[in-house]
Image (spheres, grey):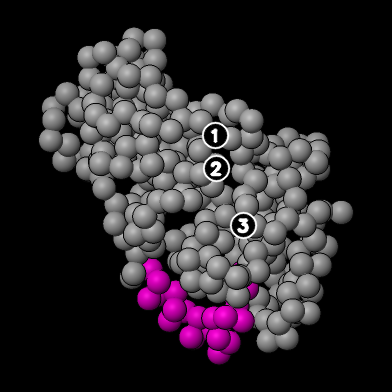
Amino acid sequence: MEYPRDIKVIIFFEKGRLGNQIFQYAAIKKIAPRAVSLFIGLENLKIMLEKIDIVEESKAWNIPLRILTRLGRSRLARMAGKGKFLTLISERHQDKQSIAIIEKGRFFPSIAVLHEAYFQDEAFSSDINRDTLAIRKTALIASSKWLRDNTKVLNKHLYFVHIRRGDYIRWPSEHEPAVLPLSWYVSQMNKVREYDCNAHFIVFTDDYPYADEMLGDQADVLISRQSEILDLATMSLCTGGGILSASSFAWWAAYYIRVSNPNAILLAPLHWAGWRKAEWYPPCIKTSWLNYIQVV
């Protein structure tokens, strides 16, 4: 798909957690690879990526641009959408694909606003330059040290287990939440153990008491208590593979692992966050390089 080439700045308000932000940034670089991003928030994304084309809000070179950022996401979106003042970038789902919709502005077409779009579709990252999304080296160095200090297992025998609970206990709905049962994780861990007798699992979670109680007594399990950025960096070094929750954070960890090991074991719940209804959710998330396992 051809995108306009005259977009120079994309105003990007924080929306969603780190995994979602990486999806959004990947889409931005696909849509307008030469544009710089003006981030409003997104501190962890700024810290995590090694090379990132941004201009700091406080250092915006253009006074009108500074004024625009003060208006907020909703006002800017209205100016770009109905007012056609700026260019608007939004998203439409069609045939289980994420489609970027570009509505050119009449007055400032070179300035775009990203609005209510996540672009959770592998198409936006499949052919992007790997350096564009590379994790910062300092984070990888710190994660490597953490692994050396906490386990003597070679990276090729390390597998991440991502257990997302928190908001997933009630999302996308209280009746059909995305949270996965412990039995599903245990089943996948046993499959990995059958394949690799030297397998060692590192659990990454937002619910430490749960992980400690359910998995903390197993000899081949280590529970990470690092920051979000170092967790993602450490997950990327588990080159044996990973067991994913239905989380964009886990998706990106798997993406980074594939850079080092295209044959990594990457197991994810069938239908992702929609596993209870047996319907893909988000609708564009199905990924060609993940191995999907039914949740029972």
Q: Quadrant of the C terminus?
A: bottom right
- Tag 2 near tag 1, CB within 8 Å: yes
Q: Which mark is residue 17?
A: none
Residue at image position (73%, 74%) is 192
Q: Main secondary structure of the magenta part?
A: helix
User: Which quarter of the rendering shows the N terminus?
Assistant: top left
Extreme residue in the front direction: 1
Q: Earlier in the sequence, mark 2 or mark 3?
A: 2
Q: Residues within 10 Å of mark 1 (few under 14, many from 20)?
A: many
Tell me residue 130's x, y (percent): 39, 58
Among numbered discs 2 and 1, the one appearing first in the sequence:
1
Residue 107, given in percent of the width and then of the height, sits at 22, 14
- C-alpha separation, residue under disc 2 versus residue under disc 1: 6 Å
Check disc 2 and report its element: helix, strand or loop: loop
* Of labels 2 and 3, the one closer to you: 3
Left or right of 178, for residue 222: left
Name the residue at the top extreme.
83
Q: Which residue matches tag 3?
A: 289
**What is the total number of numbered labels drawn onto the structure image?**
3
Res. 121 mark: 2
**Mark 1 = which residue?**
98
Kindly identify the amino acid type of the residue bearing the numbered disc 2.
Asp
Give the residue drawn at x 39%, y 10%.
Answer: 82
Residue at x 38% of width, y 31% of height: 2
Which amino acid lies under the numbered mark 1 shown in the image of this protein? Ser
Answer with the quarter of the image where residue 28 lies. Answer: top left
Q: Is residue 158 magenta?
A: yes
Residue type at mark 3 is Trp
The span shown in magenta is 139-161
Q: Is residue 105 visible?
A: yes
Question: In this rendering, is residue 12 above or below 257?
Answer: above
How far is mark 1 from mark 3, CA to CA?
A: 17 Å
